[in-house]
């Protein structure tokens, strides 16, 4: 794990600290941080997860499954957003001038997309895995991309080398978009300088000279449109939009002095031996369900079961049609709450009658391929 001092202190306080390789790094450069992690990794496959993301229990099982084919160089999964239900990211392609397209891939997969010339599978940095030896031989991630497009640059380098990339939809991660110096808790931008610099580095490396200015104009307008949407909703004012666009332009200029390397030097062999983490592949899966009044009782029971090394999901249903939300509770269990008659998946009907038992069964079925089959279901008084 590569972490800032605060993150390192949090890891140091964990009971599983002896099973974690920890590297302190406090510079604003995600590519350099990733390369430090690769240097420590001694397994055949290196998986990447952000500090504001939580994987489903079967994440690594699904993410690593395609690598049984020796031709697979990398794999990415699907990402759910802050409500824990809607998808923030499924699977997309990208072009050298940074045009993206949804690939329309669905579960279960995995998929090996066959794309038209000029398109490349685009992985998401918070949910991807690469063969370590291959990645190290490519030089890892380019430090010119301090933030943004670091994994997309690698995607195009994979494509240029003829490497095959898979998509595993059942490898799910929940991504929260934590507040930072670059964005607020509501995801409103605070600084676009590094985005501008990364766009410049990316286009300088991958986009033909004749199309570079047009690509920059299109991408700059897309950022402006995004800022205007935030202004319409309220988090940003007109002065914020102007300031952020100036930062974007400044980053574009700064990026010209930060040209990506023509050839990255290969990374070293692992600097430390493989350290096995004691996983729980056979951990019992249980579900607890009840009404709003049982919240604290359910949480107390769930925390106790989690401490006993069980994988626990709590379902709390009110007799309403409220939309559902799902998150991983600090107590070590999954918690889903919403209306008994409301929808979880946002494409479902706004109202559908259910009993507690049928609704719980439906939600268990929706998640069992990524969380595992429930072996015990406990109902509490409502």
Image (spheres, rainbow, N blue to C red):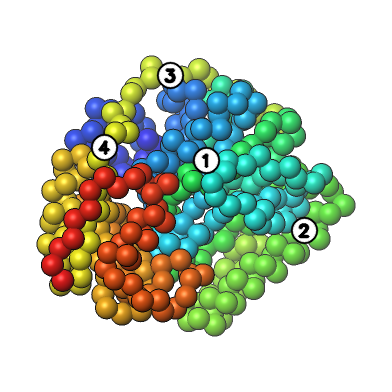
**Which of the 4 image quarters holds residue 226?**
bottom right
User: Mark 1 or mark 3, which is nearer to you?
Assistant: 1
Give the residue drawn at x 20%, y 72%: 292
Disc 1, SS: strand
Residue tagged by mark 3?
271
User: Mark 3 or mark 4, which is nearer to you?
Assistant: 4
Residue tagged by mark 1?
128
**Which of the 4 image quarters holds residue 76?**
top right
The mark nearer the N terminus, 1 or 4, is 1
C-alpha span from label 1 to label 4: 24 Å
The mark nearer the N terminus, 1 or 2, is 1
Give the camera-side residue of 50 and 373. Answer: 373
The mark nearer the N terminus, 3 or 4, is 3
User: Mark 1 or mark 4, which is nearer to you?
Assistant: 4
Give the camera-side residue of 49 and 242. Answer: 49
Q: Is 17 left or right of 119, judged from the image as shown?
A: left
Residue tagged by mark 2?
215
- Say if 100 sits above or below 72 in the image: below
C-alpha span from label 1 to label 2: 27 Å
C-alpha span from label 3 to label 2: 41 Å
Disc 3, SS: loop
Residue tagged by mark 4?
283
Image spot of residue 270 (x, y percent): 46, 19
């Amino acid at each position: 794990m590569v972490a800032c001092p605060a993150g390192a202190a949090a890891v140091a306080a964990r009971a599983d600290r002896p099973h974690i390789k920890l590297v302190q790094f406090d510079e604003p450069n995600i590519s350099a941080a990733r390369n430090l992690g690769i240097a420590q990794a001694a397994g055949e496959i290196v998986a990447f997860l952000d500090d504001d993301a939580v994987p489903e229990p079967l994440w690594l099982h699904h993410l690593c499954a395609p690598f049984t084919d020796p031709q697979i160089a990398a794999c990415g999964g699907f990402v759910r957003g802050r409500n824990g239900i809607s998808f923030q990211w499924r699977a997309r392609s990208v072009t050298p001038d940074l045009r993206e397209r949804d690939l329309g891939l669905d579960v279960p997969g995995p998929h090996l997309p066959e794309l038209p010339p000029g398109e490349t599978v685009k992985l998401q940095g918070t949910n991807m895995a690469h063969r370590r030896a291959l990645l190290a031989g490519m030089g890892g991630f380019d430090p010119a991309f301090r933030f943004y497009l670091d994994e997309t640059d690698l995607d195009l380098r994979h494509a240029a080398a003829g490497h095959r990339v898979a998509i595993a939809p059942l490898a799910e991660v929940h991504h929260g978009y934590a507040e930072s110096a670059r964005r607020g808790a509501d995801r409103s931008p605070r600084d676009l300088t590094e985005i501008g610099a990364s766009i410049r580095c990316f286009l300088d490396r991958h986009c033909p000279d004749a199309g570079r200015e047009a690509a920059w104009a299109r991408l700059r307008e897309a950022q402006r449109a995004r800022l205007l949407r935030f202004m319409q909703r309220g988090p940003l004012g007109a002065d914020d939009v102007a300031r952020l666009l100036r930062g974007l332009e400044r980053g574009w200029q700064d990026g010209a002095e930060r040209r990506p390397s023509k050839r990255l030097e290969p990374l070293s062999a692992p600097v430390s031996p493989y350290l096995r983490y004691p996983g729980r592949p056979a951990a019992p899966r249980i579900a607890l369900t009840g009404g709003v009044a049982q919240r604290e009782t359910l949480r107390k029971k769930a925390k106790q079961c989690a401490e006993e090394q069980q994988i626990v999901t709590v379902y709390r249903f009110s007799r309403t049609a409220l939309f559902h939300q799902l998150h991983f509770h600090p107590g070590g269990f999954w918690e889903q709450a919403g209306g008994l008659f409301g929808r979880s998946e946002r494409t479902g009907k706004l109202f559908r009658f259910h009993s507690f038992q049928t609704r719980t069964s439906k939600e268990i079925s929706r998640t069992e391929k990524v969380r595992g089959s429930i072996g015990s279901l406990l109902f509490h008084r409502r």
